[in-house]
Amino acid sequence: MDLFNDSNVKRKFDGYSAEQKTALLEIRQLIFDISREVAPDESLVENLKWNQPSYTAKKGTPIRLDTFGDDNVAIFFHCQTHLIEQFREMFQDELTFSKNRAIIIDPDAPLPIENLRICIQMGLTYHKNK
């Protein structure tokens, strides 16, 4: 697992419930792994935005992680992109969405890793493909 370079982000993760933290850490690692695949010479920036862990690549749009409602977690994408719209077309029967902002995930269910991998890759390369 990639170490935390920002103590505020680590503190935020430490405040999640055990189930939420496990799912969010797995998603966080997926973001780091995909970032290394799509832009091996660039560093991924991890910090807090709107008090949520945020991940930004040079040619991507910020991806944020947090809880959603009482029990779920979410991967948030910038609402002025069309990413959630695209994800909804691709994974309408496989993923759950909130408006044009987020993919909602039940932390007690197995993560849909392959679908999330595609969504995260599209977020991390959003501006590269425009």
Image (tube, grey):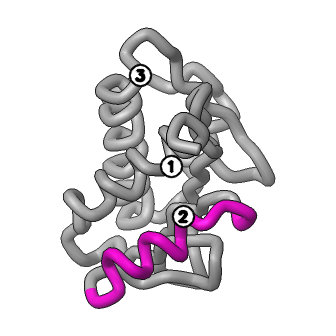
According to the picture, the residue beneath numbered tag 2 turns out to be 83
Is residue 2 shown left or right of residue 15? left
Q: Earlier in the sequence, mark 3 or mark 1?
A: 3
The answer to which quarter of the image holds residue 87 is bottom left
Q: Nearer the viewer, residue 53 or 95?
A: 95
Q: Earlier in the sequence, mark 2 or mark 3?
A: 3
Whether the residues at callouts 1 and 2 have beta carbons within 8 Å, the answer is yes
According to the picture, the residue beneath numbered tag 1 turns out to be 123
Crowd rating for badge 1 (residues with CA inside 10 Å; few <14, some 14–19, many 20+): many
Residue 55 seen: no
Residue 22 vertical position relative to residue 10 in the rendered view, above or below:
below
Residue 27 shown in magenta: no
Crowd rating for badge 2 (residues with CA inside 10 Å; few <14, some 14–19, many 20+): many
Residue 68 vertical position relative to residue 31 in the rendered view, above or below:
below
Q: What's the CA distance linking mark 3 and mark 1?
A: 12 Å
Kindly identify the amino acid type of the residue bearing the numbered disc 1: Gly
Crowd rating for badge 3 (residues with CA inside 10 Å; few <14, some 14–19, many 20+): some
The answer to which quarter of the image holds residue 66 is bottom right
* Helix, strand or loop for disc 3: loop
Residue 80 shown in magenta: yes
Q: Earlier in the sequence, mark 1 or mark 2?
A: 2
Question: Residue at point 59% right, 44% down?
Answer: 130
Residue lying at the far top in this picture: please name it.
Answer: 41
Q: What's the CA distance linking mark 2 and mark 3?
A: 19 Å
Q: Position of residue 27 (x, y in %)?
A: 37, 51
Q: Position of residue 41 (x, y in %)?
A: 43, 10
According to the picture, the residue beneath numbered tag 3 turns out to be 39
Q: Nearer the viewer, residue 57 or 1?
A: 57
Q: Number of labelled discs? A: 3
- Residue range of the region highlighted in magenta in the rendering: 79-93
